[in-house]
């Protein structure tokens, strides 16, 4: 049905052309939430592609709860200016937001294992390794309590989108502080893609390099919003994050009641990796072993 609808609005476009399909589904068909996850399996010459499509139905539009974008710019902070200068120090007259997010995804590895390991991993994603190093070195210096407090406040109240992106990056220095993880999960609901994508990469890096138990109760509103379909790009990341940070099963009722559909459906998809992410999460939150048990457990919340 979806393929037929896409063909009507975008003749000749296949489900593997994610940009065009997203435009048709969110534009002409007006789905309030659309995300394509494309998976490529195998080596060159023997590769197979699959697409997992996440949709929020029209009747569920009220479940999507982006934050309201701040309307007032905070005074420029010297540390944001310094980070900004680092991005353009390579001599370029212009810079893109990719100059922040591309090196950021390897920053937790840089902190944990050093520059050589980070640069080796980043070789295919970062075009200017010297610029990436400068960015990491300056970011590493933003590690005091006042830096964290400013970053948290910036994410909530600064209308300058670049400042909010830098603030999310700074919070990767505070893997030991639950409130830094909470603030980054809150930033997943930022209406500006550059900011919420920075938060995705920051959380992904923290989860990969610094996993530890996190007390999530104070972040429940944002957790519920993402599980309801706000920022579908972050959906599977959030399930992984909660699993790897030892989500407390005591939070099952406030977290899961009335919002289990996407998780249970994901546990039944053909894509093995995505399915396993949902299965691991459901086992962690419910302490139940299988699909039948989960459905019974969820119905009783």
Image (cartoon, rainbow, N blue to C red):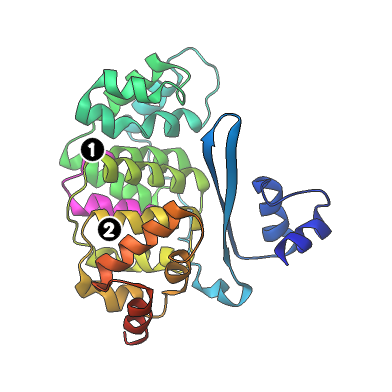
- Identify the element where label 2 is drawn: helix
Query: Which residue is rendered at x = 51% and y = 49% of the image?
Result: 192
Magenta residues, start to end: 171-188
Q: Between residue 294 and residue 255, name the one nearer to us.
A: 294
Horizontal and vertical percent position of residue 113: 21, 26
- In this picture, is 127 found above or below 58? above
Going 23% across and 43% down the picture, which residue do you hit?
148
Q: CA distance from mark 1 to mark 2?
A: 21 Å
Is the C-beta separation of discs 1 and 2 under 8 Å?
no
| Secondary structure at numbered mark 1 | helix
Magenta stretch mostly in which secondary structure?
helix
Q: Is residue 180 magenta?
A: yes
Give the residue number, with chain letter if any, for mark 1.
173
Residue 196 in picture, x, y percent from top left:
45, 49
Which residue shows up at 41% across the image and 80% down it? 258
Q: Which residue is mark 2?
A: 243
- Mark positioned earlier in the residue sequence (1 or 2): 1
58 lies left or right of 127? right
**Compared with residue 105, is residue 277 higher up or lower down, i.e. above or below?**
below
Mark 2 Cα-neighbour bin, 10 Å: few <14, some 14–19, many ≥20? many
Task: Inspect this view and state whether residue 70 appears.
Answer: no
Q: Nearer the viewer, residue 21 or 74?
A: 21
- Residue found at the far top of this picture: 91
């Amino acid at each position: 049905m979806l393929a037929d609808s896409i063909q009507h609005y975008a003749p000749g476009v296949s489900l593997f052309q994610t940009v065009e399909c997203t435009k048709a589904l969110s534009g002409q068909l007006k789905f309030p939430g659309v995300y394509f996850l494309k998976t490529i399996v195998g080596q060159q010459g023997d590769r197979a592609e699959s697409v997992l499509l996440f949709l929020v139905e029209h009747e569920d539009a009220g479940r999507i709860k982006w934050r309201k974008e701040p309307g007032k710019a905070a005074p420029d902070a010297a540390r944001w200016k310094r980070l900004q200068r680092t991005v353009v120090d390579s001599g370029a007259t212009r810079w893109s937001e990719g100059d922040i997010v591309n090196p950021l995804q390897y920053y937790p590895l840089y902190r944990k294992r050093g520059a050589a390991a980070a640069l080796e991993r980043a070789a295919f994603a970062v075009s200017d390794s010297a610029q990436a190093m400068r960015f990491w070195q300056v970011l590493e210096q933003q590690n005091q309590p006042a830096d964290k407090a400013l970053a948290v406040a910036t994410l909530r109240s600064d209308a300058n989108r670049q400042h909010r992106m830098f603030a999310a990056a700074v919070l990767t220095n505070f893997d030991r502080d639950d409130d830094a993880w909470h603030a980054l999960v809150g930033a997943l609901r930022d209406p500006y893609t550059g900011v919420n994508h920075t938060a995705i990469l920051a959380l992904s890096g923290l989860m990969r390099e610094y996993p530890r138990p996190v007390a999530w109760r104070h972040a429940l509103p944002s957790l519920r919003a993402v599980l309801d379909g706000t920022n579908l790009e972050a959906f599977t990341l959030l399930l992984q994050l909660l699993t790897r940070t030892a989500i407390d099963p005591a939070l099952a009722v406030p977290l899961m009641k009335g919002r289990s559909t996407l998780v249970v459906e994901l546990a039944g998809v053909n894509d093995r990796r995505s399915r396993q992410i949902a299965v691991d999460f459901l086992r962690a939150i419910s302490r139940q072993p299988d699909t039948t048990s989960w459905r019974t457990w969820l119905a009783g919340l």
